[in-house]
Amino acid sequence: MDDLRVERILRAVECVPRGRAATYGLIGKVVGEVPRVIGWTMHAWGSEQRWWRIVNAAGTIPGHTARALPHWRDEGLLAASASGVPGADVDPGAARVDLPRVLLAQETLERAWREAAADLPGLDEIPGGSRR
């Protein structure tokens, strides 16, 4: 994967603010990639990013929930537990991000990403919502 594609993806990840989350699919729609490429990029190059804010469509990061859980608690991203309170008594194996409540709007992410990636070549070739 070339450096430009990686940079486009990582800049989109940087646009997800504290207290919000995005899915691999949402990032993919914005930057013109499929969700699997976003997940692979996060695995390979996302360790310096706020990786815990980027989750799958179920609101989890398979294999990384235990590491993500403190961040999710700190940012108020957790779905309600059996007690009905977000983040309370969370079983780490069942923890997930409350996407209906904290998912960043696509339009908001697109706007922030286009500004953050304005200096990258070929940005006009990637309309928001497209996929390669």
Image (cartoon, grey):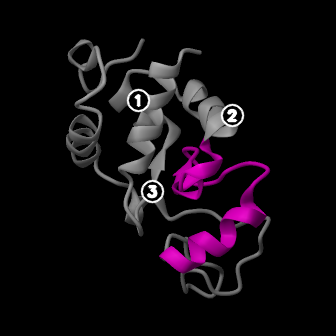
According to the picture, the residue beneath numbered tag 3 turns out to be 21
Mark 2 and mark 1: span between their CA atoms? 14 Å
According to the picture, the residue beneath numbered tag 2 turns out to be 44
Magenta stretch, residue numbers? 46-75
User: How many numbered discs?
Assistant: 3
Instruction: Find out whether residue 21 is within the magenta segment.
Output: no
According to the picture, the residue beneath numbered tag 1 turns out to be 8
Quadrant housing residue 109: top left
Give the amino acid type for the residue marked by disc 2 in the picture.
Ala
Q: Tell whether 14 sits left or right of 129.
A: right
Query: Which quadrant is the N terminus positioned in?
Result: top right
Q: Earlier in the sequence, mark 2 or mark 1?
A: 1
Q: Tell whether 46 sits left or right of 117.
A: right
Q: Earlier in the sequence, mark 1 or mark 3?
A: 1
The disc at residue 60 is none
- Name the foreground residue: 115 vs 93: 115
Q: Earlier in the sequence, mark 2 or mark 3?
A: 3
For mark 2, give the secondary structure: helix
- Which residue is drawn at the image coordinates 68% and 38% (left, top)? 43
Q: Are marks 2 and 3 in contact (CB under 8 Å)?
A: no
- Name the foreground residue: 49 vs 73: 49
Residue extending furthest front?
119
Classify 10 Å Cα crowding around label 3: few (below 14), some (14-19), many (20 and above): many
Give the amino acid type for the residue marked by disc 3 in the picture.
Ala
Quadrant housing residue 103: bottom left
- Which residue is drawn at the image coordinates 39% and 40% (left, top)? 12
Classify 10 Å Cα crowding around label 1: few (below 14), some (14-19), many (20 and above): many
